[in-house]
Amino acid sequence: MKRALRLGLAAVLIGGMTGLFSLGSTAGSAAPVCVPSAAMHYGPHPGVTIVQTSFEDGTLDNFVPATAGTGSVTLSSDQHRSGGCSAHLHVTADAGSLAKMSSAALPPGSKEVYADGWFKVATAGLFHNDVPYFRFFNGPVRVMDVLRDNIDGQMWLRIAAPDDTFTYTRLGRVAGLGAWHHLELHAVAGGPASTIDVRFDDQLLYSSSTVNTSARALTGVQVGAEHARQMGDTYLDDVSITAS
């Protein structure tokens, strides 16, 4: 796992690195078969709904995809937690390969954010890297994220301190390959008294209201990495993001 990553750029701004996104499957494969009538129950998280989707309408709803090189973001019916479709992020070890999805911008001044969704990592990346799940941003600064270590599958919480260093907390759970896992990341941006809660497979693994960050607001939520060659195949389904 990389232990010294630079802070990422803002979620939807990657300039000339942004590639062409295609709703559907890759060339030569069947189009995804979604189930618009499929109903999904979402947790009663407070705030304004930014994203609430199981991808059954055949779109990414309020997610903005960005790709480069051999990376891709597609709708897939090969894997799905409910209904018939999920979102699929594919990144290779090739130079410049990138795939991520960013939420629509959060309301100005948002302090409290819930990101709730189901993930399946079908293919792990390189041993010296990780597979990121939800990432919270304040402008260009990645404030926190939850990730899966490619070496042993362990889950970690990574938090950016005001001095631009990272702290890592091992969450004590292994995310097995090829299995759906439920992740909820909740944060209240409060500078040196920020709150962070992490639930994985409906178990509370981390909770603190004294986390020291530079963020007093949150502006966006991202799935996947904003830097290239973060190899892996990740499926995402039944997602809810709220902010207040």
Image (tube, rainbow, N blue to C red):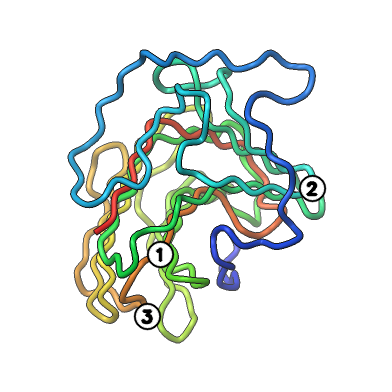
Residue 176 makes an appearance in the image: no
Q: Residues within 10 Å of mark 2 (few under 14, many from 20)?
A: some
Q: Residues within 10 Å of mark 1 (few under 14, many from 20)?
A: many
Q: Quadrant of the C terminus?
A: bottom left
Report how far apart the C-alphas of labels 1 and 3 lie in the structure: 13 Å
Q: Would residue 40 be found to the left or right of residue 100 on screen? A: left
From the viewer's perspective, is residue 4 above or below residue 64? Answer: below
**Residue 80 in the image: x percent, y percent?**
47, 21
Q: Which residue is mark 2?
A: 69
The residue positioned 50% from the left and 16% from the top of the image is 34
Give the SS element for disc 1. Answer: loop
Q: Which residue is mark 3?
A: 214
Report how far apart the C-alphas of labels 2 and 3 lie in the structure: 33 Å
The residue positioned 48% from the left and 67% from the top of the image is 142
- Please tell me the numbered disc located at residue 201: none
Q: Residues within 10 Å of mark 3 (few under 14, many from 20)?
A: many
Query: Mark 1 or mark 3: which comes first in sequence?
Result: 3
Q: Amino acid at mark 2?
A: Gly
From the viewer's perspective, is residue 70 above or below residue 18? Answer: above
- Please tell me the numbered disc located at residue 219: 1
Viewer-side label of 1, 3: 1
